[in-house]
Image (spheres, rainbow, N blue to C red):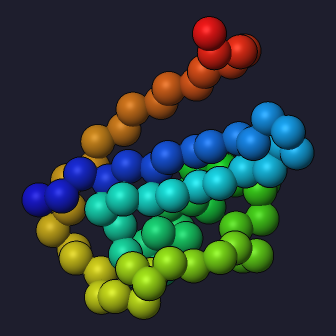
Amino acid sequence: MRKQTVLVSINKKDGSLKFETHGVKGKACIDMLDELLGELVDVSDCELKDEYYEEEDNSVAIESENEIEVGERE
């Protein structure tokens, strides 16, 4: 079973967001981001990677870990 993760990056200069999922393919990727972000971000207007178009693997273990880092890195 594969671990599902979402990597969120915030560009400090322009405030743009980048979301990257790992261990998730197809529509499940968008569904996962939609569930995580809710009304905060419109995930329908996003750039899709090649993995989005691959078939989903239904034998995935879900592990949830939330980590939020605020402030400047030294």
Q: Position of residue 24 (x, y in %)?
A: 35, 67
Q: Position of residue 61 (x, y in %)?
A: 20, 53
Is 12 placed above or below 48 here?
A: above
Quarter holding the N terminus is bottom left
- The reply to whether residue 11 is in sight is yes
Is 62 placed above or below 73 here?
A: below
The count of marks equals 0
Quarter holding the C terminus is top right
| Residue placed furthest toward the front | 74
- State the residue in front, 24 or 35: 24
- State the residue in front, 60 or 48: 48
Residue 46 image-quadrant placement:
bottom right
Instruction: Give the side of residue 40 with respect to residue 26, left or right.
Output: right
- State the residue in front, 45 or 10: 10
Instruction: Give the side of residue 63 with respect to residue 52, left or right.
Output: left
| Residue placed furthest toward the right | 14
Residue 41 image-quadrant placement:
bottom right
Q: Position of residue 8 (x, y in %)?
A: 58, 45
Q: Which residue is depicted at the point 43% across and 73% down? A: 28
Q: Position of residue 73 (x, y in %)?
A: 63, 15
Instruction: Give the side of residue 44 with respect to residue 58, left or right.
Output: right
Is 9 placed above or below 42 here?
A: above
Q: Which residue is depicted at the point 38% across and 49% down? A: 5
Q: Which residue is depicted at the point 71% across and 15% down? A: 72
Residue 35 image-quadrant placement:
bottom right
- State the residue in front, 14 or 70: 14
- The reply to whether residue 40 is in sight is no
| Residue placed furthest toward the left | 1
